Amino acid sequence: MNRKTPRFDKAFLEGKRRQLIELREQLQKTADTDEAEEAAIKNESGSQAREYEDDAQKLAMLETDGNLVSQDVDRLARVERALHKIDEGTYGFSDVSGQPVPDARLEAMPDAINTVQEQAASERAG
């Protein structure tokens, strides 16, 4: 993508950088906690007498936790990309079309790297 003239002033971008770094730290802590809990459940299952109902509940919980971890990993990648976009001067422009990402979207999701429509299309595509 071509380098664009930044849409925002330095103070705004530094504020977004701080927000994104804080969000990255939160996501990393959550992922670490979830991984530790998953490991504890797996270890606990292997060392106790088996109750199939308990195993089913634990598997369902692991699946739910795994889905949440996957979402956090995806969001962490977007946070990293948004930080990179600040550095390269393209923050606030879509990675897909190069069009401006609406300010309201950036306020709600500082890690937004695409428009709502582009993000929805990407999620539908898998």
Image (spheres, grey):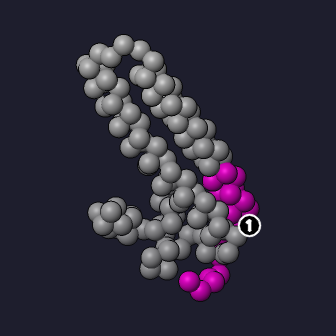
Q: Residue farthest to the left?
A: 53
The magenta-colored residue range is: 1-21
Taking 95 as reference, is 83 left or right? right
- 9 w.r.t. 2: above or below: above
Residue 105 visible to the viewer: yes
Q: Is residue 101 left or right of residue 90?
A: left
Near-viewer residue (8 or 90): 90
In the rendered image, residue 30, in percent from the top left (x then y), is placed at 55, 37
- Quarter of image, res 86: bottom right
- Up-down: is 26 above or below 52? below
Question: If the image is split into quadrants, where does the N terminus sit?
Answer: bottom right
Q: Is residue 90 magenta?
A: no
**Percent from the top left, x then y, of residue 3?**
63, 83
Q: Residue at x 46, y 43 (%)?
A: 69
Taking the image as drawn, is residue 30 in sight? no
Quarter of the image for residue 59 reads top left
The kind of residue on which mark 1 rests is Lys
Quadrant position of the C terminus in the picture: bottom left
Give the residue at the far top of this rendering: 49
Counting from the top left corner in percent of width and height, residue 19 is at: 64, 51
Q: Please tell me which residue is depicted at 48% across the width and 55% down the height of the picture.
A: 74
Q: Which residue is mark 1?
A: 10
Q: Is residue 18 magenta?
A: yes
Please report the residue visible at 70 percent of the width from the left and 70 percent of the height from the top.
87
The location of residue 73, given as percent across then percent down, is 50, 51
Residue 8 drawn above or below residue 62: below
Mark 1, Cα crowd under 10 Å, few <14 / some 14-19 / many 20+, is few
Q: Is residue 50 left or right of residue 11?
A: left
